[in-house]
Image (cartoon, rainbow, N blue to C red):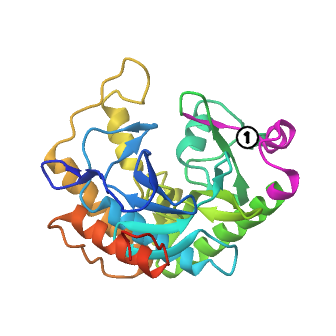
C-alpha cells in the first residue's frame, strides 16, 4: 500500500492466496479473482479532467464505496447489480462482468459539462436539441440522456443514441434495457435525494454483461459520479442568478480551471495544499452524511492494507473460494 503524508490510500498491493489479476483505474484497484469474481478496492485517488491528481484524499475511497453500496442495495428492485458482499469499508466483492463501453449520463438540469457547451454557444448535445434562453442550473422539462464513450487516449467523448446503435457498440435490445434502467435509477435517486433535502442534478451509470444479461456495475449516485444541489434556496438562487450550492467534486474542477488546468497537453497541475486536501475530505464526508442520512464512521486507519486483506480474504472463504491456501 502507498499513502501520502496525510494517510490517504493511493495504491494497494494485495497478495491474495488465489489466482488473481490486478489492474488499477483512476480510483479503484481491481483484483480479478479466479476468473469469476472481482475485488474492487476504492482508493483515495482523485481524478479530474481524466487525470489522476498528485495527492490522495483521506476517507474518499470509503465514502465512495459505502455511498455506492447504499444506493446499489436500494435499487435492486429496479435492475440487477454486481454486488456480492461489502467485506470492508473500502472494498466491494462483485460479479465479474464484461463492461459495456458506454457511460449512461442522465441530466435533470443544465449544469457542468452540458452547461459549458451551452455557455459557449452549443445548442445540441448527443443529438439532443437544447432551446435558446436557458440558464445555468435550470431544470429540463424531463431528464435527458447524454451518453459518452472513451476515446483512444482515455477521455470521455459525447456520443448520440443513433451513433451508438449504428456503430454496434451496444446491441439494440441491450440498449433499450440500459435506457430504461438509467431513467428508472435516476428517478429513484431523485426521490431519495429529495427526502434528504437535495436535488440530484446529473449522474452516470455503467453496465456490464454477466451470463448474457445486463447488470449495473461500478458506483451509483456517489460524489464522483453525481452532482447534487441543496433543495432549500434553489429557486431563490436561480431567480437571482446566483450559483447553486452543491455537493459534488465540481469545486475541484473549478479550482483546477481557476489555476489554468483542464487536462490539456502542456498544462501543469496546480499545487494541492494540505488545507485544500482537508477541505475535499470534509466535502466528501458531508456528501455521504447528507445523501444517506447516516453518520460517517471512519474505518480503522492503522494498517489499512492488512485490514483490507484480512476482511476480504475472510469473505472469499465464506463465498467458497476454496483453494489449498484458503482452506
Q: Give the range drawn in magenta.
A: 155-174
List x then y, in percent, for residue 208.
67, 57
Say whether residue 194 is left or right of residue 159. Answer: left
Question: Where residue 123 appears, x then y in whole percent?
Answer: 71, 36
Q: What number of labels is visible?
A: 1
Nearer to the camera, 17 or 3 = 17
Work out which residue is located at the far top of the displayed protein and give it: 266
Query: Would residue 315 be found to the left or right of residue 79 on screen?
Result: left
Say which quadrant the C terminus sits in.
bottom left
Is residue 11 depicted above or below 176 in this figure?
A: above
Q: Is residue 88 visible?
A: no
Q: Residue at the location (37% across, 17% down)?
A: 266
Residue 216 x %, y %: 64, 64
Q: Nearer the viewer, residue 240 or 132?
A: 132
The residue that disc 1 covers is 126
Against 283, residue 270 (above or below) is: above
Q: Does the magenta stretch include residue 153?
A: no
The image quarter containing residue 269 is top left
Amino acid at each position: 500500500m502507498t499513502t501520502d503524508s496525510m494517510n490517504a490510500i493511493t495504491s494497494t498491493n494485495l497478495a491474495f492466496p488465489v489466482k488473481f489479476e490486478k489492474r488499477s483505474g483512476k480510483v479503484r484497484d481491481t483484483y480479478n479473482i479466479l476468473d469469476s469474481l472481482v475485488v474492487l478496492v476504492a482508493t483515495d485517488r482523485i481524478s479530474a479532467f481524466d487525470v489522476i491528481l498528485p495527492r490522495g484524499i483521506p476517507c474518499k475511497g470509503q465514502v465512495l464505496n459505502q455511498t455506492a453500496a447504499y444506493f446499489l442495495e436500494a435499487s435492486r428492485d429496479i435492475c440487477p447489480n454486481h454486488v456480492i458482499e461489502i467485506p470492508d469499508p473500502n472494498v466491494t466483492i462483485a460479479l465479474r462482468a464484461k463492461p459495456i463501453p458506454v457511460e449512461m449520463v442522465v441530466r435533470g438540469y443544465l449544469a457542468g459539462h452540458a452547461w459549458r457547451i451551452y455557455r459557449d454557444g452549443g445548442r445540441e448535445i448527443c443529438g439532443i436539441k437544447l432551446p435558446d434562453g436557458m440558464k445555468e442550473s435550470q431544470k429540463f422539462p424531463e431528464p435527458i440522456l447524454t451518453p459518452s464513450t472513451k476515446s483512444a487516449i482515455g477521455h470521455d467523448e459525447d456520443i448520440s443514441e443513433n451513433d451508438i446503435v449504428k456503430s454496434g457498440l451496444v446491441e439494440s435490445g441491450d440498449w433499450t434495457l440500459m435506457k430504461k434502467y438509467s431513467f428508472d435509477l435516476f428517478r429513484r435517486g431523485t426521490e431519495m435525494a429529495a427526502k434528504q433535502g437535495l436535488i440530484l442534478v446529473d449522474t452516470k451509470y455503467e453496465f456490464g454483461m454477466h451470463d448474457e444479461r445486463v447488470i449495473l456495475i461500478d458506483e451509483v449516485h456517489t460524489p464522483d459520479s453525481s452532482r447534487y444541489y441543496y433543495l432549500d434556496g434553489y429557486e431563490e438562487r436561480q431567480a437571482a442568478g446566483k450559483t447553486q450550492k452543491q455537493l459534488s467534486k465540481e469545486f475541484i474542477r473549478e479550482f483546477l480551471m481557476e489555476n489554468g488546468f483542464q487536462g490539456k497537453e502542456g498544462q501543469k497541475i496546480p499545487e494541492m495544499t494540505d488545507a485544500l486536501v482537508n477541505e475535499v475530505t470534509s466535502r466528501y464526508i458531508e456528501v455521504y452524511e447528507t445523501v444517506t442520512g447516516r453518520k460517517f464512521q471512519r474505518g480503522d486507519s492503522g494498517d489499512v492494507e492488512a485490514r483490507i486483506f484480512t476482511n476480504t480474504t475472510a469473505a472469499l472463504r465464506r463465498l467458497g473460494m476454496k483453494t489449498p491456501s484458503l482452506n
